[in-house]
Amino acid sequence: MRSILDTIPDAMVVIDERGIVQSLSATAERMFGFTADEVCGRNVSMLMPSPHRENHDDYLARYLRTGERRIIGLGRVVAGQRKDGTTFPMELEVGEVRGRGHRLFTGFVRDLSERQHTERRLQELQPELSHVSRLTEMGQMVSALANEVNQPLTAATNYVEAARLMLAGGGDVAFDRLTRVVGNVAAQITRATQIIQRLREFIKKGETEQRAEDVSPRT
């Protein structure tokens, strides 16, 4: 038992039916700041903040009387209190051992402080991550848009160059041919304008439409 208490990675506290601590693992000593000698023989409620400290014996008595489980065999996130008075969130799983006319309760404790700190930090970073994601998506959109707009602009440039060559060639230039070339230039510029307009409509912030919906199952 001593070897287990010294090497088990989770904090472990063993109490009897009265809530008196029988043993404390080395990890639990480091977690709570008490030595085993300071805790063993005393009520385990000393490791809890108020109001759980004052109510713990009632919790235990109710379980012994009714068998109603609230933590034992179920596990729960509760608060612990260190020797210096600071509190911390912890995951508590309690098992029950019966033998020789008495019961022992074994509590396995995991300190959730670091995990909750990480979760809070991730929540704080979420807007920045969302912003980076939007910038990435915008970059991809701009790249696709540049390709879309470049096509009609390239075509318009080619038509303008063709018209210039026609006019620079001297002689009579067929009016209908020149008209078609200028018309093609206008069409390509219009196409580019429509692409930009669709992008503006896509990113424009509009009014949100809200309406009530019946969520009851249909028969």
Image: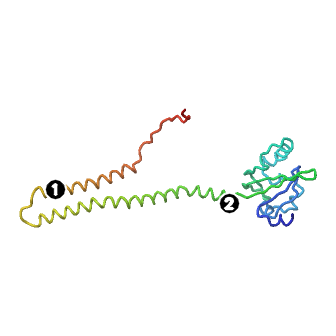
Q: Quick one: label 1 or label 2, which is nearer the N terminus? A: 2
- Amino acid type at image mark 2: Glu
- Amino acid type at image mark 1: Arg
Coloring basis for residues: rainbow
Residue 114 numbered tag: 2
Q: Position of residue 77 (x, y in %)?
A: 72, 51
Determine the image quadrant of residue 189.
Answer: bottom left
For the residue carrying disc 1, how many other residues have a C-alpha within 10 Å: few (<14), some (14-19), or many (20+)? few
Could you say which is closer to the camera, residue 42 or residue 90?
90
Judged from this view, the residue extending furthest toward the top is 219
Horizontal side of 134 relative to 185 (left or right) equals: right
Q: Position of residue 57 (x, y in %)?
A: 85, 46
Residue 18 numbered tag: none
Residue 180 numbered tag: 1
Mark nearest the camera among 1 and 2 is 1
Q: Secondary structure at mark 2?
A: helix
Residue occupying the point 60% across, 58% down = 121
Q: Position of residue 12 (x, y in %)?
A: 80, 59
Horizontal side of 139 relative to 155 (left or right) equals: right
